[in-house]
């Protein structure tokens, strides 16, 4: 062990304290400050604890929790600030589990680039010309959209233009991240609507039986009762990337007629809902909701270059498709086979017609007034006839022939009161099936 050397002792000089430190007054002041601080700390602690417990008990009524002492972080549930905001949040929570993303993929050719010498590899001219050749095919994503589940066994409603390609493959992603291969059950020949089907998962329960897991289903509302100005909520797979994106607006207009184009087709869509809720690419086929979380429309189109103008097909039109697919597996429409104008006072005056209401059978735009060998042709309807009544109901601008036929089915027999050359007659027709 090493031993430290002895160090010489050093005498420190005595330090004299100032006279003030020997003063009683100073020590009384110090004592007073110490006692006041101690009592203040104790009183503050007691009061703080009391107020914390009271506040915690009060806020618990509103499902708000305060962090316990010592905790650094605590998640506090957001409380809606208005009743309207609360209803929007509730509607989205109800509908979101049934909203799905649809991915469209297809086997596309894969090419590679190569070079060749047009004079041959042994030529003195070293010229290399780039060429492309196919080396096979590869499944690639070519589009996407949105849909929503309308039955517990996996029926999904979406837009027809989302699933228009009959050679493509369709994959559905549910809100919980699961994926399912989907098949197209039916495409509506008139409306921009289609119905897909995904298969439910199956599990073996405790008794050994095979049990199907039901899908969450969205509720359908009533589009006939819509009013301009009421709140509208759109949910969809925005831009094919941001699933279940929510946008909020109002019903801006009703019974609009638009010409929509996309996916290589152009079609006229009538009686659609206009909304200023943002509808972006990829939102097609998603639901437009009311504040109760029910579907009032199917988002279908937006105006390029405009702001806050989107359109949705009324849900009541889709109910017919859903019921038909459930019953028959297909979507069909009744077909009369005429070209006509709904008569209004303006149409009457411009064409010197004898009545101000009805359906005037007339040719135009290269189309015949009566389709050859159609139900109307077989019933004896001629160009220039005016249909006044359909199955006993008077035809008006608000009760059109189109709406009357829309509510019929192929094979239905209908009576029509027809005005021809000043004479009324009744003709009977057996409606046929619209082939699109």
Image (cartoon, rainbow, N blue to C red):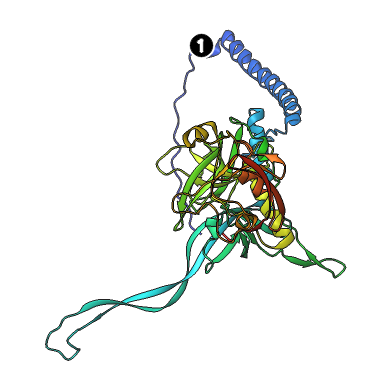
Q: Residue 346, percent across and down? A: 50, 32
Q: Mark 1 falls on what kind of element?
A: helix
Residue plotted at (55% across, 54% down)? 370
Residue topped by disc 1:
20
Image quarter of the C terminus: bottom right
Q: Position of residue 167 (x, y in %)?
A: 52, 69
Q: Nearer the viewer, residue 77 or 290?
A: 290
Query: Can you name the residue that lies furthest to the right here?
Result: 207
Tell me what residue is drawn at x 73 percent, y 30 percent: 62
In the image, taking residue 79 as reference, residue 164 lies left or right, namely left
Image quarter of residue 171? bottom right
Place residue 401 in its image quadrant: top right
- Image point (51%, 11%), residue name: 20
Above or below for 286 versus 27:
below
Could you say where residue 32 lies in the image, as x and y percent from the top left?
A: 63, 13
Disc 1: CA contacts within 10 A as few (<14), some (14-19) or many (>=20): few
Determine which quarter of the picture holds residue 221: top right
* Residue 112 vertical position relative to residue 343 in the rendered view, above or below: below
* Relative to 109, 362 lies left or right: right
Residue 96 is at least partly visible in this image: no
Residue 42, given in percent of the width and then of the height, sits at: 70, 22
Tally the marks.
Answer: 1
């Amino acid at each position: 062990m090493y031993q430290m050397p002895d160090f010489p002792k050093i005498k420190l000089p005595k330090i004299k304290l100032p006279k003030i430190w020997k003063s009683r007054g100073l020590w009384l002041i110090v004592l007073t400050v110490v006692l006041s601080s101690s009592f203040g700390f104790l009183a503050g602690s007691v009061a703080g604890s009391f107020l914390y417990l009271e506040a915690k008990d009060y806020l618990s009524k509103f499902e708000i929790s305060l962090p316990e002492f010592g905790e650094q972080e605590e998640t506090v549930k957001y409380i809606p600030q208005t009743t309207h905001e609360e209803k929007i949040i509730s509607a989205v929570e109800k509908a979101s589990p049934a909203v799905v993303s649809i991915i469209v993929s297809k086997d596309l050719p894969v090419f590679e680039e190569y070079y060749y010498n047009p004079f041959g590899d042994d030529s003195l001219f070293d010229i290399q010309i780039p060429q492309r050749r196919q080396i096979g095919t590869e499944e690639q994503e070519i589009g996407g959209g949105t849909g929503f589940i309308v039955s517990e066994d996996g029926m999904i409603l979406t837009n027809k233009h989302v699933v228009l390609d009959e050679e493509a493959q369709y994959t559905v992603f549910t809100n919980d991240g699961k994926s399912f291969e989907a098949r197209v059950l039916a495409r509506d020949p008139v409306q921009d609507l289609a119905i897909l089907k995904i298969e439910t998962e199956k599990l073996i329960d405790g008794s050994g039986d095979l049990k199907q897991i039901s899908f969450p289903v969205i509720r359908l509302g009533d589009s006939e009762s819509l009013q301009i100005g009421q709140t509208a909520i759109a949910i969809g797979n925005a831009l094919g990337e941001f699933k279940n994106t929510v946008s909020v607006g109002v019903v801006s207009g009703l019974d609009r007629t638009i010409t929509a184009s996309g996916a290589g087709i152009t079609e006229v869509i009538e009686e659609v809902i206009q909304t200023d809720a943002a509808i972006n690419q990829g939102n097609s086929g998603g639901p437009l909701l009311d504040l109760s979380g029910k579907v009032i429309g199917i988002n279908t189109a937006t105006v390029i270059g405009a702001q806050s103008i989107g359109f949705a097909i009324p849900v009541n039109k889709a109910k017919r498709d859903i019921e038909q697919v459930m019953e028959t597996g297909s979507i069909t429409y009744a077909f009369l086979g005429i070209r006509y104008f709904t008569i209004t006072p303006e149409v009457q005056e411009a064409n010197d017609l004898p009545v101000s209401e009805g359906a005037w059978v007339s040719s135009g735009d290269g189309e015949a007034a009566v389709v050859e060998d159609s139900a109307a042709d077989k019933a004896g309807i001629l160009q220039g006839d005016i249909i006044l009544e359909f199955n006993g109901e008077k035809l008006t601008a608000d009760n059109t022939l189109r709406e009357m036929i829309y509510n019929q089915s192929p094979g239905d027999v209908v009576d029509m009161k027809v005005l021809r050359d000043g004479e009324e007659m009744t003709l009977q027709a057996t409606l046929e099936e619209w082939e699109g």
